[in-house]
Amino acid sequence: MPGARQAGPTPGFCDGDALRRKDTMPQPLDSRPKLRPVSASPIEHEGRPMVLVTDPTRLAAGPVVVSPAALFLLSVMDGRHDLDQIAGAFRLQFGQPLPRSHLESLVRRLDEAYYLDNRRFAEYYAAMVDEYRAAPARRSPDAASFGAADGDLADLLDRILDGHRPLRPCPDGEPIAGLIAPHLDFPRGAPAYAESYGALAAARPAERFVILGTNHAGRGRSVVATGKDFETPLGRTRTDRAFLAAVERACEADLCADEFDHQREHSIELQVLVLQHLLGPENFEIVPFLCPDPCGPTGTAPPDGRGVDLRIFAETLGRLVRRDNKRTVIIAGADFSHVGRWFGDDRDLDEAFLAEVEQHDRRALAAVVDNDPDRFADILRSTDNRTRVCSAGAVYALLAALPDARPELRVYHQAVDVESGNGVTCASVVLHASAAD
C-alpha cells in the first residue's frame, strides 16, 4: 500500500471511547471477514502516519484509526478470503509473517465497531430500523449540529434571514411553485437560504411542502419516503401521510421500504427547520422524499431494479400536486459542487480553480433556468460529475415535477475554506408558478 513501511510493518489499530466493547460475551470470529464500504483518509496520529477509516453511512460505532499496513489487511477482507489467506497476502506484500493473534484482534475490533458485513451487523441494523419505525417521529440532533454553536438555533436563523435580505423580493402574494435552497449548514449557506426563503415568505402562503432531499449515505437506490413526522429543536411538524400514500399508489411502489435512510440524512430537515422558523412548526405539513442520482449508467431507473423510476416519480408527484386542492410548494434541498483536497481534488482552492467550478456550475444552472431536467443531468453525466454535484436527483425531480414553472436563478454562492481545502457551492432558485396555477 502507498505509504506502508516495507521493513517491520505493524497492523496497528487504535480506537476510542466510541469503540469500547459493549458485549458481555465474546462473539464468534468471522472466518471470511467482509468489510462494509468505508472511506479512508491519511492522518498523523501520535507522530506516526496513520489512516482514518470512517463509515459513510454513519452506522458504525465511530471512526477507527489504523496503520497503513492494517489498511492493506482491510483491503483483502472481501468475504472471499479466509484468515490464513489474508495473512498470506500480508506476507507477500510486506515480506514477513503476520502473527495470527494480531489479525484476529483486528477482525474482532472491526466486528465490535460494526464495520463488518455479517449477521451481527444485520441484527444491529434491524434493531435500529425497528426503533425508528416504533418512534412517534423522526428526531433531529441538537441545534449545534446545524451551525448554531451556542445552541440558539432560532437566533441564528433570525440573523441569517434578516442579515441577507433578498435582492429581488417577490411581489406579495405571488404564487411560487418550487424552490431550490441549500442543504449546507446555515452559516455557510446563508446567502442562498435567505434568497430562497425570503422569496417564500413574501409569496402566497402554502399549506404543504413537498421536500426533495439527497440520499447521501442510505441504502435505498430509488426514491425513499418516510411517513414520520419531523421533530426538531424548534418543534414538531406533521407529515401528510394521506398524500404520501396517494403518491405510493400512483407509483405502484413502497417508497417507505428504506425509510430509516431519513434518520441520518440532513438535506430535508434543514429545510424543515427554516420553514418552522418562518411559519411555526404546526402551521404546515410536509411530504419528505430522498432522491437518487440520475447520472449513473441506468439513468433515472433504479440500479438494483427495486423501486420507482425517478422520472416517473417526479411526473406522478407533479400531477398529484396539480390535482390537489391543498396549496403546495415543492422544495429541493440541494447543494451543487464539492471541490478541493477535502473531497479528493489534487488542487488548491485558488481563484482559477474556483472560476472553473463556477463556469461548470453555471452551465448546469442554465439548464435549470430553462427547466430542462434531462439537459441538466446530461451536463453532469458528460463530465462523470467531476465536481461531485450531490443533489442532481432532487433538482431533476423538482424540474420534472413542475414542467410549466418558470425558474429564476436568484443567487449563486461558493462556501470556501481555503485552509482545509473544502469548497461547496449552492444556489437559490425560485420556480414561479404558471398562470394556470
Image (cartoon, rainbow, N blue to C red):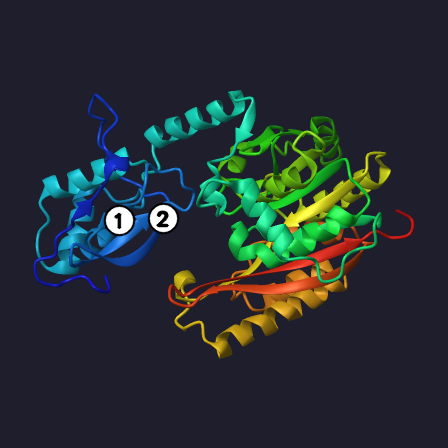
Above/below status of 276 relative to 337: above
Q: Is residue 146 left or right of residue 181?
A: left
Q: Position of residue 287 (x, y in %)?
A: 68, 35
Q: State how far apart marks 2 and 1 are (Cα).
A: 10 Å
**Neighbour tally class for label 1: few under 14, some 14-19, many 20 plus, Cα within 10 Å:** many
Q: Is residue 265 left or right of residue 101?
A: right
Is residue 43 or residue 206 the one in the foreground? Answer: 206
Q: Position of residue 347 (x, y in %)?
A: 41, 73
Above/below status of 234 relative to 127: below
Q: Position of residue 380 (x, y in %)?
A: 60, 64
**Given contact means CB atoms under 8 Å apart, are the residues at marks 2 and 1 in contact?**
yes
Going by the picture, which residue comes out furthest to the right? 436
**Whether residue 306 is visible:** yes
Quadrant housing the N terminus: bottom left
Is residue 271 or residue 253 the one in the foreground? Answer: 271
At x 81%, y 38%, the residue is 327
Q: Which mark is residue 342?
A: none
Tell me where residue 45 sits by quadrant.
bottom left
| Residue ID for mark 2 | 38
Asked which secondary structure carries label 1, the reply is: helix
Asked which secondary structure carries label 2, the reply is: loop
**Amino acid at circle 1:** Leu
**Whether residue 292 is visible:** no
Q: Mark 2 against mark 1, which lies toward the viewer?
A: 2
At x 48%, y 48%, the residue is 147
Q: Which mark is residue 74?
A: 1
**Amino acid at circle 2:** Val
**Neighbour tally class for label 2: few under 14, some 14-19, many 20 plus, Cα within 10 Å:** some
Q: Position of residue 307 (x, y in %)?
A: 62, 39
